Amino acid sequence: MNGSPRRPVRIAGASGGVYDRKRAIHDLAKNEDLDFIVGDWMSEASMTLRGADKYGKNEASLVGKGYEPYFLEQLEPALPYLEKKGIKLCVNAGGSDVEGLALAVRTLIKRLGHNLSVGYVDGDDVTETVFDLMKKKERFVNLSTGTPLSEWGLEPICAQCYLGGSGIAAVFGAGADIVICGRVADASVCVGPAMYWHGWTRDNMDELAGALMVGHIIECSTYATGGYFSGFKQLGVHDTDMGYPIAIIDHRGEAIITMEQGRDGLVSPETVISQLMYEIQGLHYYNSDVTAYLHSMQVSSIGQNEVKVSGVKGLPPPPTTRVGITAKGGYQAEFHFYLTGLDIQEKFEMVKRQTLATMGDNVKHFSCLTFTMAGVVAENPQSQDEATVDMRIFAQSRTPEILSAGGLVESDRGSFARYCIENLLQGYPGSTMAIDMRQAIGKPFFEYFPTLLSQTLVREIAHFPNSDALRVEPPRLTKEYPPGQQASSDTENPADLAQFGPTKPAPLGFIAYGRSGDKSSNCNVGIFVRREDEWDWLRTVLSTDKMKQLLAKDYKGGRIERCEMPGLRAVHFHLVDHLERGYTATSGYDCLGKNCCEYIRARVLDIPVRFLERGRV
């Protein structure tokens, strides 16, 4: 950069997903002093669904487009304020049809008579490239399971890779007011504007790494301001209209996190650290432009609803980028029974035994068949609800007929639903099924295969408002990192636990915050505490073996990676392939891994009494 540093850039995060609140872009543009509004509309689920839409393979689609049409509803009321105040917008709502959404936005702007220019970034659709490499016997390996693509047993539909922020910066540099993207990484929609604003290049690795982690903080909107927060009781009743986060990023890549004024929620070190823990994989946070190293990261309060983020170290990006390959998995359905009162386990086993007997040899048609139970009957229950648990029979098959995928009419003829319901009159005492039979009718589902692709094979294009286009070259300087895994170790200098005094059995969550999330079939769990002495205790107690004990019946023998973040007083665990096949195909209740942390926080440990006397989280 030449000359004096530019003032800090003000960037608001307006969306953390497809179904975030409609008011966000409008209210932020109207009421806040901002330079940019950014938003994340994409997830691994939307990658599969919009990709299948684009390639005409999603028979259950309610959208029918390769992009997120709901974005247009959120954008329209904000356009006058974006134009009047000169606020720029960057979103990844383009899904699998970036050009299509850019055209739709231009059409909307023209129809309403606004003067705003639109550019876009594409190249994330690498379907043809991946298919060509498959024909050449390229060995794509699943990042979670280590399984080669050739052994997947499914026919890929499409492939989409993650892009960085360089293309976004180029489009803003060409004069765009609005930049539409597809599968840029969630945090890239923040990196690009900061890169453009401060004149950074890929050589500014520390600055880019700082902006990358700030982007991670605001990418999920109100997850940084009180949403999905294990300390949510601090909000009291002020939780119905949480404010959206705002990041003020300076020329060094350091930032102040604050929030929309006059709204519910809060910004504190705890809300910010919670979001930092979400969906990371370890101390290295990879992006196409830079790798952020988190060991020395610092978060501190500097005022009411103001938190400073600093200390992120930048390293070269990997030579590869993450790719998600989508395939049709088949059809899935589920059936629910309600079990009440005494002898719950015996009732569960009776249903399972009868159902399997009715299925007979047809069991072979199911690629997945699980029997699970959620809930526990309260001791001396005071209502029937307190005495009732849910039993779920979940099935997947590539044979639509076995799941009555043709419709409800067929649901009672030699199919999954029939097998489940047929034993009702010879069932357990109180035998009762869920009355909504629609769940028992097969619906299509998709499988997702995460792997890597060389950045040199990605043809990223920045499309300018004047119809010019620029090829975004891959980074010159890269660094090899172990694929699919990160450094893992228990604490180096364990504390003497006796120094913390007498202990008392209590849930870990009485003294510790945390957050968990998914990345394909992997689950991450971050646990952190409030004070330094609690940190010495936490890092000593929460070993890899202890995490296995805490997972208890949920631990299936998979690899667990552990690291520490001293500046955040956090211990982080990466549970590899913990979520079966990930959101789009898992048979579990916790399909996104979000409740794993709350389960761990509910587990009882011997906790120092002096920590408990400080009050519950």
Image (cartoon, helix red, strand yellow):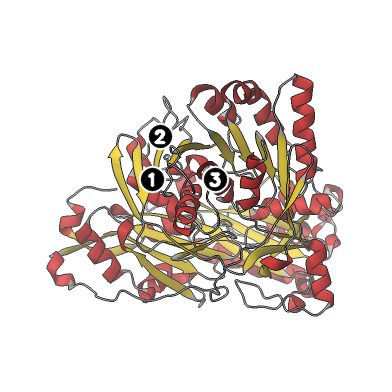
* SS assignment at label 2: loop
Q: Is residue 561 left or right of residue 154?
A: left
In this orientation, which residue lies closer to the viewer: 59 or 164?
164
What residue is shown with label 1? 271
Disc nearest the viewer among 3 and 2: 3
Q: Is residue 244 above or below residue 295?
A: above
Q: Residues within 10 Å of mark 2 (few under 14, many from 20)?
A: many
Q: Residues within 10 Å of mark 1 (few under 14, many from 20)?
A: many
Name the amino acid, label 2: Gly
Q: Is residue 14 above or below residue 513?
A: above
Residue 422 shows up from this direction: no
Please report contact status of discs 1 and 3: CB closer than 8 Å, yes or no: no
In which quarter of the view is residue 599 placed? bottom left
Q: Residues within 10 Å of mark 3 (few under 14, many from 20)?
A: many
Please report contact status of discs 2 and 1: CB closer than 8 Å, yes or no: yes
3D distance between C-alphas at marks 3 and 2 = 22 Å
In this orientation, which residue lies closer to the viewer: 8 or 308?
8
Seen at 80% across and 48% down, the residue is 60
Q: Give the x, y percent position of residue 519.
A: 57, 61
Q: Give the x, y percent position of residue 211.
A: 48, 50
What residue is shown with label 2? 265
In which quarter of the view is residue 239 placed? top left
Name the amino acid, label 1: Thr
